[in-house]
Image (spheres, grey):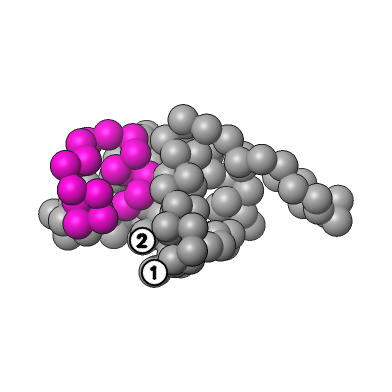
Amino acid sequence: MTPRYRRLVNSLSPGIDLDSQEAIAAAMLLSAAKNGANLRKVLNATGVSAGVGTRIYERLRANRIWWRGTLRHSGWGDKETGEIAFWMDVCVGAGLMKRAPTQTSGDEKP
């Protein structure tokens, strides 16, 4: 991970292991939110290796967080919930949990 993203992730969660899947997933999500959900651009911006980054991306895609070239996030800045939504999405990317299925129109196939 680049020094910039290491500092950013550490500022959000002081003491986090910056080489952990959680820290790397956080960096990738932050980059995708800022610069667009293009895997190649996110990997270049964050300095995450293709192997690690692709595994995180696949988990996020399987859970429809990173979906059809967009990042589907909500509540990341919600003060009422303590901004927990971001960290839950990080846990999905790290492989620690899955997002609960939601009602869809049926047109959302991977």
23 displayed left or right of 14? right
Question: Range of the magenta residues?
Answer: 9-27
> How far apart are the alpha carbons under marks 2 and 1?
5 Å
Q: Is residue 54 visible?
A: no
99 displayed left or right of 19? right
Of the pair 51 and 76, the residue shown nearer to us: 76
* Residue 80 position in % (x across, y down): 49, 64
* Residue 20 position in % (x across, y down): 27, 34
Disc 2 marks a residue whose amino acid type is Ser
SS at mark 1 in the image:
helix
Residues at circles 2 and 1 in contact by the CB criterion of under 8 Å: yes
- Image quadrant where one finds the C terminus: top right
Residue 82 higher or lower than 19, as above or below: below
Residue 42, by quadrant, is: bottom left
On whether residue 13 falls in the magenta region, the answer is yes
* Residue 27 position in % (x across, y down): 32, 52
Disc 1 marks a residue whose amino acid type is Lys
Q: Residue at x 34, y 39 (%)?
A: 22
The crowd level at tag 2 (other Cα within 10 Å; few <14, some 14-19, many 20+) is: many
Q: Is residue 63 visible?
A: yes
On whether residue 93 falls in the magenta region, the answer is no
> Which residue position holds label 2?
31
Of the pair 72 and 16, the residue shown nearer to us: 16
The crowd level at tag 1 (other Cα within 10 Å; few <14, some 14-19, many 20+) is: few
* Residue 61 position in % (x across, y down): 58, 45
> Which residue position holds label 1?
34
